[in-house]
Image (spheres, grey):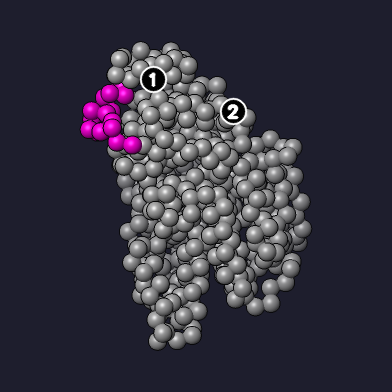
Amino acid sequence: MAEFPKVSKLSSQHQKPVGLVLQYGTAGFRTNAKLLDHIMFRMGLLATLRSKKTKATIGVMVTASHNPEEDNGVKLVDPMGEMVTPAWEGYATQLANAEQDDLLTALKDIIEKEAINMSQGANVFVGKDTRSSSAALSQAVLDGVSALDGHSKDYGLVTTPQLHYMVCCQNTQGKYGDATVEGYYHKLCQAFIQLTKNASNCTDDQKHLSVDGANGIGALKLREMESRLKRELQISLFNDGSKGKLNHQCGADFVKVQQKPPTGLTINPGERGCSFDGDADRIVYYYTDSEGQFHLLDGDKIATLISTYLKELLTQAGLDLKIAVVQTAYANGSSTHYLENTMKLIVRCAKTGVKHLHHAAQEFDIGVYFEANGHGTVLFSKAAEEKIQQLTEDPNTNDERKRAALLLQSTINVINQTVGDAISDMLLIEAILTIKGMTVQQWDAIYSDLPNRQLKVKVSDRRVIDTTDAERRAVSPAGLQEAIDSLVKKYKQARSFVRPSGTEDVVRVYAEAETQESTDALAHEVSLAVYRLAGGVGDEPKPLH
């Protein structure tokens, strides 16, 4: 115990409930806020070790994103603003679950395994969302950092993507931008103004956007930023946190799942609206038509708009850069068909989960990735950024090519490449619609989604399902994929796949086909096959109609 007296002393103020076991998943730790005090302290310890190991600044974000208000959570941010590596996710789980008396042993184990030089300095950036529990929990993180004599900077209330951005700015010695909230607003808004100043005759009503802030941190930050947009974008902010409850009947997740506008947002037919999620790393757009029908423009539609725009600019600039769109198996078949066949773009399918998409997007000069839920961004390789830069500086470049290259440069500056960012994505989408003189209806009409349906089947053990080909085909249990293949053949434009949930003993079923009726029938038949072949529990799945 003697080697870390400060850890012993401070950890006794952040006691772990005996027997509590939590797992560091895709979104870090997330659960009821009352169970998280010890976790936060220990993530402060871990971030300090990670900083010593990488000799770089590490971020710790206190948020539970789109979860209810009473929950909270924590995510670690690696040096380039990306998610922490799988090995360190393992350490996070190990450290979180060590009983109080075993904490130092677990800590020493990580130090030994990673051969960490404890005399190396450490620097940790900490941010939090607007939940009532966030203040005390972020203080526990700061306690953890100081227990190992790390240096910390408390950014207070920031969106998750803002913290990722700060970490990246710090570790690139300011090359990516200035590591302050002010610096973030300045970079994004300047780029937005540069992009939209070339747009001809944009009327005030075309510049108007209704935003649902999910009663979260995104609303607060959008308020701070608004004036810098110089009326180039006129925002009406709803669910700004002044009276509503975080994520309650509002936010991107609610809108996507319920397929209806958020509570508290009034929007005239044909007008654009968008929703952020609780920590502002996802965005979805929507409008209602003259018949009062609701239309959702999700991550697939967003990726299509952005990649089409980038491909057109690359052609105008005469740049031969490899651009690809990365999707998951959940992407609507119509979007994949349009991107491949009409736009002649490379489309890659990656496993579900942002880190898989981010990784796949890094393989191209320009990688556009979005999950259907509205989480995504665009990555530019160093070589791509340099080629665009050279073109803007070359005196022999003709006007059309130079204009396209300058637009590409401003586009790079409006994008937060570290992670999906609702504010940055919103500015990019608004700029594209302005430059192209497009309405939200015209954007929606690029392609029509195939009807789709998602169902869940309870099973006794989700591990019996094993998949391949980016989760599009089941390799076990025996006979399941053959059953799905023969069911899919019965319907036009049909596709279906199954995958185990990452969190509970259920199997998720996805189906799409030419009509909703066919889709629902296919989804039900595939659910039955899963129930019969993969150890379903409870009653057999019932038909939807």
Q: Which amino acid type is marked by label 2?
A: Ser
Image height of 267 relative to 311, above or below: above
Nearer the observer, 307 or 225: 225
Nearer the observer, 131 or 543: 131
Quarter containing the N terminus: top left
Q: Which residue is tagged 1?
A: 6
Nearer the observer, 473 or 382: 382
Quarter containing the C terminus: top right
Q: Which amino acid type is marked by label 1?
A: Lys
Label 1 residue SS: helix
Where's residue 117, x and y in %? 25, 33
Whether residue 115 is in magenta: the answer is yes
Where's residue 461, x and y in %? 38, 27
Binning the other alpha carbons within 10 Å of mark 1 as few (below 14), some (14 to 19) or many (20 upward) gives some
Residue 176, image quadrant? bottom left
Image position of 348 (left or right of 113):
right
Q: Is residue 14 visible?
A: yes
At horizontal 61% and vertical 33% (from top left) the residue drawn is 131
Where's residue 6, x and y in %? 38, 20
Query: How far is mark 1 from mark 2, CA to CA?
Result: 25 Å
Label 2 residue SS: loop
Q: Which residue is tagged 2?
A: 133
- Looking at the rendering, the stretch of residues picked out in magenta corresponds to 106-121
Whether residue 111 is in magenta: the answer is yes
At horizontal 38% and vertical 75% (from top left) the residue drawn is 390
At horizontal 53% and vertical 60% (from top left) the residue drawn is 187
